[in-house]
Image (spheres, rainbow, N blue to C red):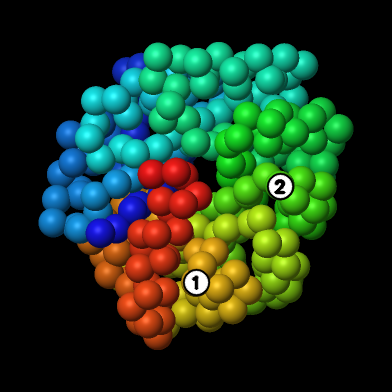
């Protein structure tokens, strides 16, 4: 069995995805609905998925919760609330008491798009993270290398809150550089309350070529060493991954990149860890 800890769905007739810009992103400027997900999953061995928010819109998360009720393989939802809102606790509470609120397992914000590299340690944001912790949810970190120092500080202030690092903090795969990303990943991983998603790497490489495990391996080696197989989880980042690879290719590359693990640890990365983190 496999859990895919990171995928998206959207309907452009319902809501625009303003981050899809430029000709290189054009393959994503269409609807990706539950039927498309089911088609992608066919034959993959994936029996549970985590649906993740895409925009900072309070209406999106309730819609995702309803989807989780009707799409049998969606087993958890990572939604969005405005962490800076004064009534952030009430907003999280309304999501949790939604008729389908039991699917809500985490909160995420696209910190990567914030111009302030210290956004995560602003007092209002820290108050929002405290609300996430009090609600018993996980918080997903969508950050880039330059935002990792603030992420490290924020994680240190909430040792009881589980943080999930999305996409290995988007390492500079295309350039082949490891630093300062690698040292900052190790510093983040020193906090035992952080789990890392092995996701989003194929789109950090050159999209014009087939996914190349050779170019990705040094980055996977860093996160494997830093987090260990008990704090890594597979995620496809579908449909964003389609910019560089088909769904089946992403799973195949992830398995090749972790082929050095024994069966127990591979089961942890591809299944058991996700079930524990998201209470699946």
Q: What residue appears at the point 79 percent right and 30 percent down from the top-left corner?
A: 127
SS assignment at label 2 = loop
- What quarter of the picture does the C terminus occupy? top left
SS assignment at label 1 = helix
Mark 2, residues whose alpha carbon is within 10 Å: few (<14), some, or many (≥20)?
Answer: few
Residue 199 visible somewhere in the drawing: no
Rendered image: mark on residue 122: none
Image quadrant in which you'd find residue 75: top left
Question: Depth check: 209 or 59 in front?
Answer: 59
Taking the image as shown, residue 237 lies to the left or right of residue 73, namely right
Up the image or down, 257 lies above or below 237; here it is: below
Up the image or down, 227 lies above or below 143; here it is: below
Q: What residue appears at the point 67 percent right and 66 percent down from the top-left corner?
A: 189
Residue 276 location (% of width, % of height): 46, 52
Taking the image as shown, residue 211 lies to the left or right of residue 82, namely left
Q: Which residue is mark 1?
A: 229
From this viewpoint, which residue is outermost toward the right? 123
- What quarter of the picture does the N terminus occupy? bottom left
Residue 42 visible somewhere in the drawing: yes
Q: What residue appears at the point 70 percent right and 71 percent down from the top-left corner?
A: 186
Question: Depth check: 12 or 34 in front?
Answer: 34
Q: What residue appears at the point 63 percent right and 74 percent down from the top-left corner?
A: 226
- As measured in the structure, the alpha-carbon distance from the residue carrying label 1 to the one carrying label 2 is 21 Å
Question: Depth check: 212 or 44 in front?
Answer: 44
Label located before the other in sequence (1 or 2): 2
Observer-side mark, 1 or 2, equals 2
Question: Depth check: 94 or 264 in front?
Answer: 264
Q: Which residue is mark 2?
A: 160
Mark 1, residues whose alpha carbon is within 10 Å: few (<14), some, or many (≥20)?
Answer: many
Up the image or down, 29 lies above or below 15; here it is: below
Residue contact at pointers 1 and 2, CB within 8 angstroms: no
């Amino acid at each position: 069995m496999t859990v895919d800890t990171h995928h998206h769905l959207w309907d452009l007739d319902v809501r625009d995805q303003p981050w899809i810009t430029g000709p290189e992103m054009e393959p994503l400027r269409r609807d990706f609905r539950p039927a498309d997900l089911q088609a992608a999953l066919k034959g993959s061995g994936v029996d549970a998925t985590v649906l993740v928010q895409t925009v900072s819109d309070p209406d999106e998360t309730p819609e995702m919760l309803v989807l989780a009720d009707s799409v049998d393989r969606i087993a958890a939802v990572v939604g969005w609330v405005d962490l800076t809102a004064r009534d952030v606790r009430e907003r999280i509470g309304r999501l949790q008491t939604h008729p389908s609120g039991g699917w809500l397992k985490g909160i995420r914000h696209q910190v990567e798009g914030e111009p302030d590299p210290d956004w995560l340690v602003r007092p209002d944001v820290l108050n929002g993270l405290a609300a996430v912790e009090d609600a018993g949810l996980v918080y997903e970190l969508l950050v880039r290398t330059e935002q990792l120092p603030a992420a490290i500080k924020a994680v240190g202030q909430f040792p009881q809150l589980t943080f999930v690092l999305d996409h290995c903090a988007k390492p500079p795969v295309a350039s082949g550089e490891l630093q300062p990303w690698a040292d900052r990943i190790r510093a983040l991983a020193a906090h035992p309350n952080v789990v890392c998603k092995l996701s989003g790497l194929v789109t950090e490489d050159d999209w014009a070529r087939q996914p190349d495990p050779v170019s990705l391996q040094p980055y996977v080696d860093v996160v494997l060493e830093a987090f260990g197989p008990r704090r890594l989880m597979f995620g496809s980042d579908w449909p964003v991954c389609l910019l560089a690879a088909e769904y089946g290719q992403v799973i195949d590359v992830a398995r090749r990149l972790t082929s050095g693990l024994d069966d127990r640890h591979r089961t942890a990365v591809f299944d058991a860890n996700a079930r524990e983190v998201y209470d699946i």
